[in-house]
Amino acid sequence: MPDTQPAPSQRGASRRRATAWGVRLATLVSAVLTTTCGTPVADPPSGAGGSTAVRDPFIAFASDFRGFHSWTSYDVTDDATLAGIHDGSTVTEYINTMPSSGSEEFPLGTIIVKEATGGTIPHELFAMVKRNGGFNSGAPGWEWFDLALLDDGKDGTSIVWHGFGPPIGDTYGGDAKGGCNTCHTACGNDAVCAKPLGLSNFQHD
């Protein structure tokens, strides 16, 4: 049987071609990875004002509420008393970003946290978040949250429930159907009831 093994010079040439091809392939893979994976991926914007980019739709996570006590705040105790909610509490609302002058609605990514302390219920923490994306036709774009304050030294929260309103069997704000939309839409002002947060307050020349 004839010897079919390639000559040493042929084997060497084949190895050199394989090595060159391997180098070219490795270079190509490295370039692709650099292009697709090398671009930094922005962290979700934090409620305290992290990234300027806003997710759309804005689906809020517990981390988005962190540090809310440092946001612009308003005492809305009188408004809550008139509405007959948060009996005996001191009520403060915090907002993460202000609407621009002339706005007819609050922008995507707006977070408003309402904290009630010292009342019949010692501590309550609720929020409304402008989610958009066609969410909640009753109060367009708004998602409601019940939060719990964490004792983590970082002003963190956990989410008790979120969605169109409280879970079945729970009520809030005197809404017989257990939801949040009824009272908030009756307020106008893009469903934000706190008088200091009236959109007309943000009109500038």
Image: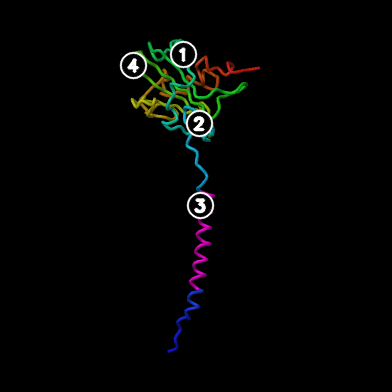
3D distance between C-alphas at marks 1 and 3:
52 Å
> What is the three-letter code of the residue carrying label 1?
Val
Residue 23 falls within the magenta-colored stretch: yes
Instruction: Pick whichever of labels 2 and 1 is earlier in the sequence.
Output: 1
Residue farthest to the bottom, as pictured:
1
Q: Which residue is mark 3?
A: 33
> What is the three-letter code of the residue carrying label 2?
Arg
3D distance between C-alphas at marks 4 and 1:
17 Å
In the image, residue 85 sits, relative to residue 96, either above or below, namely above
Near mark 2 (Cα within 10 A), the count class, few <14, some 14-19 or many ≥20, is: many
Q: Which residue is mark 2?
A: 131
Helix or strand or loop: what does disc 3 sit on? Answer: helix
Q: Which residue is mark 1?
A: 76
Marks 2/4 in contact by CB < 8 Å: the verdict is no
Instruction: Pick whichever of labels 4 and 1 is earlier in the sequence.
Output: 1
3D distance between C-alphas at marks 2 and 1:
24 Å
Instruction: Pick whichever of labels 3 and 2 is earlier in the sequence.
Output: 3
| Residue at 52% from the left image edge and 65% from the top image edge | 21
Instruction: Point out the stretch of residues depicted in magenta.
Output: 14-36
Judging depth in this view, the residue of 67 and 75 nearest the camera is: 67
Numbered label attached to residue 48 = none
